[in-house]
Amino acid sequence: MIGRLNHVAIAVPDLAAATAQYRNQLGATVSEPQAEPDHGVTVVFVELPNTKVELLEPLDEGSPIAAFLERSPAGGIHHMCFEVDDILAARDKLASEGARVLGGGEPKIGAHGKPVLFLHPKDFNGTLIELEQV
Ligand code: CO
């Protein structure tokens, strides 16, 4: 059901510093910062040949990323995103098997303008999983 790894998202305490590190130290192509108010984050996309890394900084104190950084002040891997062909079919299959879909189960439009859903980390080995319909 899942396809390509679309991105790995990393919560960072200092987006400018993290962006500079990926650009200058790791030699990656990075985007301009983009505010995503619906998700409570500012995001920078790191473009790699086979996938992306997304650097996430909280937009405000109510952001889910702010809570993550309280527990992990140095930052850390926040979620992985897998591509699916049909997000509603994927949701219905997973929900019927007992997996918890976050946020009421209705897809939101994600940072790439495509529908996304998140799955509860306790159902997936402690890893928050995002599904994106491509
Ligand atoms: Co994501």
Image (spheres, helix red, strand yellow):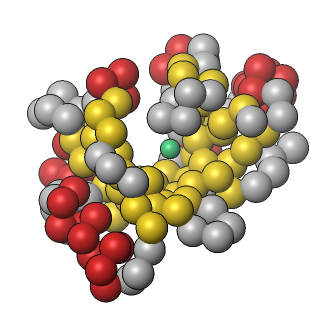
Q: Position of residue 62 (x, y in %)?
A: 18, 28
Residue visible at 35% across and 73% down in the picture: 22
Foreground residue among 57 and 102? 57
Q: For the C terminus, give its image quadrant.
A: top right
Q: Position of residue 39 (x, y in %)?
A: 36, 29
Q: Residue furthest bottom?
A: 25
Foreground residue among 133 and 72? 133
Residue visible at 81% across and 51% down in the picture: 3
100 versus 55 height, above or below: above
Which image quarter: residue 115? top right
Residue visible at 44% across and 74% down in the picture: 28
Residue visible at 54% across and 22% down in the picture: 109
Position of residue 63 in the picture relative to residue 90 (left or right): left
Q: Position of residue 99 (x, y in %)?
A: 68, 34
18 versus 8 height, above or below: below
Foreground residue among 120 and 50? 50
11 versus 113 height, above or below: below
Q: How many marks?
A: 0
Q: For the N terminus, give its image quadrant.
A: top right
Position of residue 51 in the picture relative to residue 102 (left or right): right
Q: Position of residue 38 (x, y in %)?
A: 36, 22
Residue 111 appearing in the image: yes
Foreground residue among 51 and 94? 51
Q: Residue furthest left?
A: 61
Residue 77 appearing in the image: no
